[in-house]
């Protein structure tokens, strides 16, 4: 009973896999039309051989009818050749084939055996050949539906054998059995072939599944390769791929670089865990802005980038976009119990489709970012040709630095620092000057930073310090001389030891030498800077913190570093008309008094400023109102004239206060 159920399920195409049913249907759409053309040819062959012996009603007219039906079926299958059907539809059509195969088999064998009563032995042999060729041909054409082949063989061969056994004609009976044996053998072969066909489909399915798994794994790998594992946003590789794709579209777009200001102090103060949490939060904020025209990526460290492919012809709109990003990323972050505040600077470049910028875009955006970081922190800079010209000029200066004879070309000028309360010169600040035979006089704001970048700053510092000590001995060994240290100097133990050795070799008393440093000089390597500054302090040198009040951690450095003097940043002095600024300056002066620190107010340019600052408690002043930087001979003459004493505050109220 179980075997019978299995046979019925097999015959009726139950429990057949969907992909197998679809494959069978597709194969039959190509083969069944061939089968019908074979039936047409066979029927007309047997009809022609019996035209003279059989009635037309039993021969010719039946052949015509079979031809019409066969052509209709050919047309039907041609229409279904490109049909995209579901497995259920395909199974339904295959069952229709089984029914039609049963009907056609019965009809053809009945018609053929009816013709067997007409004609001679040759014509009867034609009938036997017709039956054999029809069965074999149909079996071949229905090879991908073996149930149909079995049905056709059964409904044709059984009546065929019975018919010739009943007639008791040995030759025709032998032919019938011979044909039946061949058909049975063919069915076995076709079943084996169909089994291999199923295995091939199954292997293809397994292969397709493995390919799908491989593609999914490859997709995941590509995603991982293009994603920053910490922030979850695209990484540097993805960023540059997108830049290349955007360049290929031959239309303008903008790329921007975002750098977090004061990230390192946060990382150093609160630890790398908080630093990582901060980067994750920045990544989240940028991911919120993801759109069809905006893509952000982390390029490394605390640097992020973005690509904007929208409307970029309005530079102010692009600037506004960059500024909105800076403002968004600068908002304070609550990371657990820690609240941190940072800033963000941005550099943007807009591509030009007419120019090959594959290698220049990032460099130009980086140059614009550097401009923001150095001159307009927290703001946006869009690359322009002026900025490019400035960059080329800096490259010329850097090239000149490498070939310069610094011992001959470097000079030192001195700007006095006076105490207007006790009517005395406190000392001088030694300032670097460089005059190149080709480029002329170069601003120290430019060549100092370029010397650091070029790796020449140590030699430059040592050369300038030796020259500064010579001038100091002329101006007065009992006066204090301030000398500026760069970021590299402050963090280089070798440089600090050489400066100490030069002082000893020149018999200069350390207490009359003050080394000035800015917050930015120590921000990147606070531990090394602190160690070196304490070594200078232990040798008797003084330490001054320059540009006080504008940095991120100025107050913290007063407590951590061995500071003796504070120099109030000149930006406050130029803005004294603002009440808030006056309050800040007054607070700084009071802070210095409370911590027993000397307070030097630099950048004073007129009598009104001096009067007002003196009223706030200021004593030590430096600036153009006192004197401009001078070479040694000029400084000696200036000291002898004592013209600065005219600036000593009197009783007259300055115009600024009256206003």
Image (cartoon, helix red, strand yellow):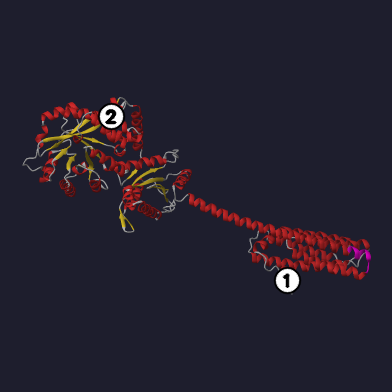
Q: Is residue 170 magenta?
A: yes
By secondary structure, the bulk of the magenta-drawn segment is best described as helix
Indicate which disc, 2 or 1, sits on the residue closer to the N terminus.
1
Write the start and end of the magenta stretch as one range: 168-175
Left or right position of 122 against 43:
right
Left or right, 476 with respect to 467, comes to left
The reply to whether residue 115 is in sight is yes
**Frontmost residue, 210 versus 131:** 210
Residue placed most toward the observer, 29 or 219: 219
Q: With 161 as the anchor, is 593 left or right in this view?
A: left
Does 129 lie within the magenta span? no
Q: Secondary structure at mark 1?
A: helix
Name the quadrant containing residue 135. Answer: bottom right
Rendered view: 48 above or below 405: below
Does dot 2 land on a helix, a strand or a loop? helix
What is the number of the mark on residue 8?
A: 1
User: Which numbered dot is residue 463?
Assistant: 2
**Residue extending furthest left?**
651
Cα gap from disc 2 to disc 1, whole angstroms: 104 Å
User: Looking at the image, is 201 positioned above or below residue 567?
Assistant: below
- The residue carrying pointer 1 sits among few (fewer than 14), some (14 to 19) or many (20 or more) residues within 10 Å by Cα, namely few
The image shows residue 40 at horizontal and vertical percentages of: 80, 60
The image quarter in which residue 508 lies: top left
92 or 440: nearer the viewer: 440
Instruction: Name the mark nearer the viewer: 2 or 1.
Output: 2
Residue 235 in picture, x, y percent from top left: 44, 48
Rendering coords of residue 210 (x, y %): 60, 55
Q: Residue at x 33, y 32 (%)?
A: 456
Numbered circle sitting on residue 423: none
């Amino acid at each position: 009973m179980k075997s019978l159920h299995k046979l019925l399920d097999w015959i009726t195409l139950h429990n057949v896999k969907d992909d197998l049913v679809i494959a069978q249907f597709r194969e039959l759409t190509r083969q069944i039309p061939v089968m019908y053309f074979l039936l047409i040819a066979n029927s007309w062959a047997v009809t022609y051989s019996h035209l003279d012996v059989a009635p037309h009603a039993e021969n010719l007219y039946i052949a015509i009818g079979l031809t019409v039906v066969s052509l209709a079926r050919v047309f039907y299958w041609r229409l279904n050749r490109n049909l995209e059907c579901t497995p259920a539809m395909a199974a339904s059509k295959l069952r229709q084939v089984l029914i039609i195969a049963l009907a056609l088999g019965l009809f053809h064998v009945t018609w053929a055996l009816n013709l067997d009563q007409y004609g001679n032995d040759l014509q009867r042999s034609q009938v036997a050949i017709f039956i054999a060729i029809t069965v074999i041909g149909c079996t071949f054409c229905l090879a991908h539906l073996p149930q149909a082949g079995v049905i056709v063989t059964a409904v044709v061969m059984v009546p065929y054998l019975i018919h010739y056994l009943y007639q008791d004609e040995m030759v025709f009976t032998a032919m019938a059995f011979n044909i039946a044996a061949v058909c049975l053998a063919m069915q076995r072969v076709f079943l084996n072939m169909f089994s291999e066909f199923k295995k091939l489909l199954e292997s293809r399915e397994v292969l397709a599944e493995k390919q799908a798994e491989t593609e999914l794994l490859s997709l995941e790998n590509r995603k991982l390769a293009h994603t920053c594992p910490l922030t979850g946003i695209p990484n540097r590789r993805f960023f540059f791929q997108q830049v290349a794709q955007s360049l290929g579209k031959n239309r303008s777009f903008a790329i921007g670089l975002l750098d977090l200001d004061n990230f390192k102090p946060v990382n150093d103060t609160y630890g790398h865990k908080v630093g990582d949490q901060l980067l994750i939060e920045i990544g989240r904020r940028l991911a919120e802005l993801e759109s069809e025209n905006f893509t952000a990526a982390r390029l490394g460290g605390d640097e992020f980038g973005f690509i904007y492919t929208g409307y970029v012809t309005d530079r102010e709109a692009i600037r506004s976009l960059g500024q909105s990003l800076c403002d968004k990323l600068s908002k304070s972050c609550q990371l657990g119990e820690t609240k941190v505040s940072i800033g963000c600077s941005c550099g943007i470049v807009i591509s030009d489709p007419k120019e090959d910028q594959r290698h220049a875009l990032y460099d130009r955006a980086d140059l614009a970012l550097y401009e923001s970081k150095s001159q307009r922190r927290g703001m946006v800079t869009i690359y322009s040709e002026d900025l490019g010209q400035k960059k080329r000029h800096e490259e010329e200066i850097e090239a000149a630095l490498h070939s310069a004879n610094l011992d001959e070309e470097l000079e030192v000028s001195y700007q006095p620092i006076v105490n207007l309360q006790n009517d005395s010169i406190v000392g001088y600040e030694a300032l670097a000057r460089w005059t190149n035979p080709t480029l002329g006089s170069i601003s120290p704001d430019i060549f100092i930073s370029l010397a650091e970048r070029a790796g020449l700053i140590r030699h430059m510092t040592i050369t300038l310090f030796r020259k500064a000590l010579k001038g100091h001995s002329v101006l007065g060994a009992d006066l204090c001389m301030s000398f500026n240290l760069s970021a590299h100097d402050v963090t280089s133990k070798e440089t600090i030891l050489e400066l100490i050795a030069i002082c000893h070799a020149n018999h200069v008393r350390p207490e009359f030498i003050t080394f000035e440093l800015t917050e930015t000089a120590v921000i990147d390597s606070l531990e090394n800077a602190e160690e070196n500054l304490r070594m200078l302090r232990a040798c008797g040198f003084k330490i001054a913190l320059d540009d006080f009040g504008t940095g991120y951690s100025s107050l913290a450095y007063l407590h951590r570093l061995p500071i003796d003097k504070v120099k109030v940043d000149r930006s406050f002095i130029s803005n004294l008309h603002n009440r808030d600024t006056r309050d800040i300056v007054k607070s700084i002066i009071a802070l210095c008094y409370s911590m027993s620190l000397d307070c030097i107010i630099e950048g004073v340019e007129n009598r009104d400023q001096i009067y007002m600052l003196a009223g706030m408690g200021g004593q030590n002043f430096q600036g153009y109102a006192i004197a401009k930087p001078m070479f040694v001979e000029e400084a000696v003459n200036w000291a002898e004239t004592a013209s600065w004493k005219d600036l000593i505050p009197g009783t007259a109220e300055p115009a600024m206060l009256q206003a």
